[in-house]
Image (cartoon, rainbow, N blue to C red):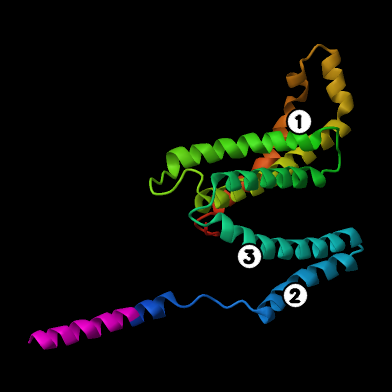
Amino acid sequence: THGASLHAAHHSDQHSQGMCVLRGGASPHLGGRELVIAALPVLLSAGLARALSLRSLSRSIVVSSFRLSFQLLLFGGALLQYLFRPGTSPLSVLIWMGLAGFVAAREASARVPHTYRGMARDCAAASGVGVWSALLYTRTFVLRDATALFWSGRVVVPLAGILYGNAAARTGTCLTVVLAEVAEGRDRIEARLARGAGVWEAARQVVRDGVGAAMAPTLTQMAATGLVTMPG
């Protein structure tokens, strides 16, 4: 009876393991052929843009695709492996965050049609304050892990990357709207100032439009998360 029980338990364990393999499946393989296939829609988009006489957009699509691939190969293949190691110094994580903040600020201000002196500095300050505040709050009160260091690369790097990516996109959108409205409605703003309005009162509607435009994609994503898009 005891032997039969062991045999049954062993058979059940093998069956359970097999079911786990069948249910979990294997990770999809990404080789050279799959990467070429994945690049075809990008090339198609670039071709359509060129057919519509949008040569600058077509060139930007191609250049951005190559740049994206290079950054993923470099960052994912070398830097992430180093930053994710358990013994990585917090200084290395902070240096990466500084570099990421610099790149995010540069990208946020690079595609804004209207510019002014010191715009990149203002982008860095705005995104830096937001990202560091959210990161410190989340790491202190939400993602409290007693087994990991506060500046653990496995926790901080992915979180900071998400925050910096969103901050760069939203800052660029807000700047585009605000500076465009200031350039087009300069007479209205100057008229309000001439009638005694303060700086905030004269530019309040412009700032509201910029913040609203910047937050619209985030609100749309929040409304769709769980139903249309899946986090993670």
Q: Is residue 151 above or below residue 133?
A: below
Residue 77: assigned label: 3
Ranked by sequence position, the earlier of labels 3 and 1 is: 3
Front position in the image: 141 or 208? 141
Ranked by sequence position, the earlier of labels 2 and 3 is: 2
Residue under the image location 70 percent in, 78 percent down: 37
The amino acid type, in three-letter code, at marker 2 is Leu
Q: Secondary structure at mark 1?
A: helix
Q: Is residue 9 magenta?
A: yes
Disc 2 designates what residue? 40
User: How dense is the environment of label 3, judged by Cα within 10 Å: few (below 14), some, or many (20 and up)?
Assistant: few
Residue under the image location 44 percent in, 42 percent down: 142
The overriding secondary structure of the stretch rendered in magenta is: helix
Ranked by sequence position, the earlier of labels 1 and 2 is: 2
The amino acid type, in three-letter code, at marker 3 is Gly
- Distance, label 2 to label 3, CA atoms, is 24 Å
User: Residue pushed farthest left?
Assistant: 1
Disc 1 designates what residue? 206
Q: Is there CB contact under 8 Å for labels 2 and 3?
A: no
The amino acid type, in three-letter code, at marker 1 is Val
Residue 135 appears at what percent x and percent y?
54, 41
Front position in the image: 206 or 40? 40
Q: Secondary structure at mark 2?
A: helix
Q: Which residues are magenta?
A: 1-17
Q: Is residue 217 magenta?
A: no
